[in-house]
Image (cartoon, rainbow, N blue to C red):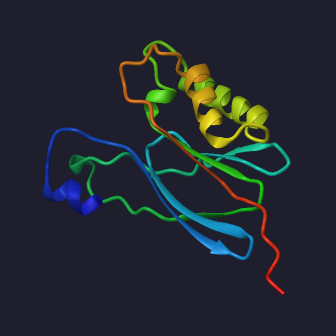
Amino acid sequence: MEDACRTVPVEVGGTLVHAHLHPVGASWSLAWTNAGHPPPLVRLPDGAVRQLDEHGILLHHRLGPFPREDQHTVLEPGSTLLLYTDGLVERRGRSIDAAIARAARLLAEAAGTLPLPELLEHLADSVSPGDSDDDVVLLALRVGEAEPAPR
């Protein structure tokens, strides 16, 4: 992404989360880097929600090359990963931190009981109830329980 920003010097910056998932037994290894985007959220199997807060600066050709380091965590069976665009949580005159905290609270309450399509609809309707003029996109992944090996 840094190369693209230098090659196409437009006067617009951007944010992103770039992530890779790899299976490790019944769990999944998540590697990600964040360029100024709102933090992904992970609902742990015990119901607690963790913000993946580690991030770097946004993408823009005038900011120059910025070293980005991958962060790593393991998603255990029963975990739910939530990625979302800033349109979910950013509103003029409102606290983005409060909106992220609300999304985390709703994820903690509902992720263990709702199927993913209903969870995403619930989050979008509750955190961003139609008052955004920005795009609102949510992507969730739930790590299933390991199936027993065939005998």
Judged left or right of residue 1, residue 44 is right
| Residue in front for this viewpoint, 16 or 112 | 112
Name the residue located 75 percent from the left edge and 62 percent from the top edge: 76
Left or right: residue 137 compared with residue 61? right
Residue 149 lies in quadrant? bottom right
**Whole-percent x and y of residue 150?**
80, 83
Picture residue at 59% right of the left edge, 24% below the top: 99
Residue 128 versus residue 80 in the image, above or below? above
Q: Quadrant of the N terminus?
A: bottom left
Residue at (63, 68) in percent of width and height: 29
**Position in image of residue 17 (x %, y %):** 45, 51
Describe residue 85's horizontal placement relative to residue 11 as left or right: right
- Is the C terminus in the top left, top right, bottom left or bottom right quadrant? bottom right
**Where is residue 89 shown, x and y percent of the image?**
51, 27
Q: Position of residue 15 (x, y in %)?
A: 37, 44
Q: Nearer the viewer, residue 121 or 71?
A: 121
Identify which residue is drawn at 62% across, 49% down.
Answer: 52
Q: Residue furthest front?
A: 151
Number of numbered discs: 0
8 vs 57, left or right, is: left
Give the vertical position of 25 relative to 67 (above or below): below
